[in-house]
Image: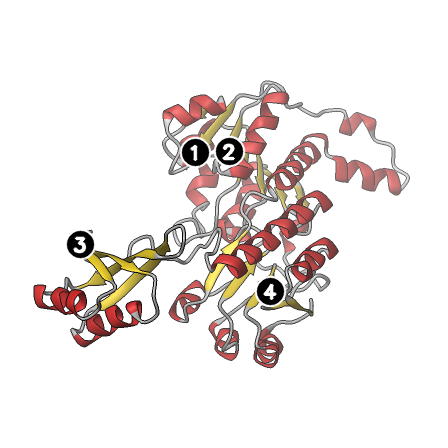
Amino acid sequence: MKVLVADKFEDAGLSGLKALGCEVFYEPLLEGEALGQRLSETSADVLIVRGTKVSAAEMEKGTALSLIVRAGAGVNTIDLVAASHRAIAVSNCPGKNSIAVAELTWGLVLALDRRIPEQARDLAAGIWNKAEYGKAAGLAGRSLGVLGTGSIGREVIARAHAFAMPVLAWSRSLDDRTAAELGVTRVDTIHELALAADIVTVHVALTKETKGFLDASFFGAMKKGAFFVNTSRGEVVDAAALKAAIAEKGIRAGLDVFEKEPAGGAAAFLDDIVKLDGVVGTHHVGASTEQAQNAIAAETVRIVKTYKLTGSVPNAVNLSDRTPATHLLSIRHRDRVGVLAHIFGELSAAGINVEQTENVVFAGAKAACARIHVDPAPAVEVLERIQKGCADILSISITTV
């Protein structure tokens, strides 16, 4: 199996891929047309990326490509529709960077409360201003609002308890039972959370529903002087609304992500929001700890290993939950050459589409059971042709799905 790694990747991960017997092409600066060209030249079966965008154009060049692994959590840089149309599985490594992102989240909260960046700049400039900087509110007893209770949000919540902070939480999937287990108060809307929280932190995936959903009405509901921290994706925030809230309501913001970020690891940064008073910015490095990256590398190797050995894809994000199949054929048969070819030939001749199939072989490799999801249902005469046309078929049953 050939693997093209088009972003920086840990040595342990590269060694792990090679130990699987993979032919590894490590070219961490590929993007755009050059990426497509190398997919073509290497005939890579697997592409591993981090922040590199993978569009339909690159996939079209990768004629052998069957799996893309995002060595991280989000997959918004990969064209999932194009991948699905080309039967390319897309996988990711959810939860492996959760602690790292949670740690940076709290770093930003503390930086906002104690004004650490401003203090450091003044000291470096030879300015001692204890009178000004000795006015922090502190965290104990202040309310934290957590938007999103996935793996990162839960790590943030766990640390909030250590700071003796009451926690409000919102998520579309959060119910009262889970809220009780997490030790949080569930709120029904993001606006209810904004009204009540002293500090808001964002941990949601970027989707059609969340793009720009933190808008003027949301920031209008926040308390004056409240803190806003975003370590998820810049696009979930209406940047103009956030700037207005900073200017008009004294909102202080800790941002690791931005609406417009440079594509590479080093480039000019043109978003002027970080120049506003009360804003602390970092370089989209929430997941960038050695611990997190080693965990992600190990998970990436596991995904490739499973795919190489079994053909299944752990953490796949673009497989259909339900196929268009209307019926399930269960065909018990002797494990001999030509049996499946006979079955599929008869189905094809009858104009019946096979949506999904598996063939389970029993101990001793003498017999197997083919489970074939089809649409539409085969007529009785088709089933009779399948049964009578091959002496190695033991039985056929059909059920509606």
Q: CA distance from mark 3 to mark 4?
A: 48 Å
Tell me: residue 218, above or below residue 188. below
Callouts 3 and 2 close, C-beta under 8 Å: no
**Residue at 65% across, 41% down:** 100
Please give left or right for residue 72 compared with residue 331 in the image: right
Q: CA distance from mark 2 to mark 4?
A: 29 Å
**Residue at 66% across, 63% down:** 7
Circle 4 residue = 52
Q: Residues within 10 Å of mark 2 (few under 14, many from 20)?
A: many
Q: In the rendered structure, which amino acid carries the disc numbered 3? A: Ser
Q: What is the quadrant of residue 277 in the picture?
A: top right
Q: x and y percent of residue 347 in the render?
A: 20, 70
Circle 1 residue = 170
Callouts 1 and 2 close, C-beta under 8 Å: yes
Q: CA distance from mark 4 to mark 1?
A: 31 Å
Q: Which label lies toward us, 4 or 1? A: 4
Q: 389 and 296: which one is in front?
A: 389
Secondary structure of the residue carrying tag 1 is strand
Choose the circle earlier in sequence order: 3 or 2.
2
Tell me: residue 313, above or below residue 62. above
Circle 2 residue = 146
Q: x and y percent of residue 2 in the render?
A: 60, 70
Q: In the rendered structure, which amino acid carries the disc numbered 4? A: Thr
Choose the circle earlier in sequence order: 2 or 4.
4
Choose the circle earlier in sequence order: 3 or 4.
4
Q: Residues within 10 Å of mark 4 (few under 14, many from 20)?
A: many
Circle 3 residue = 397
Secondary structure of the residue carrying tag 3 is strand
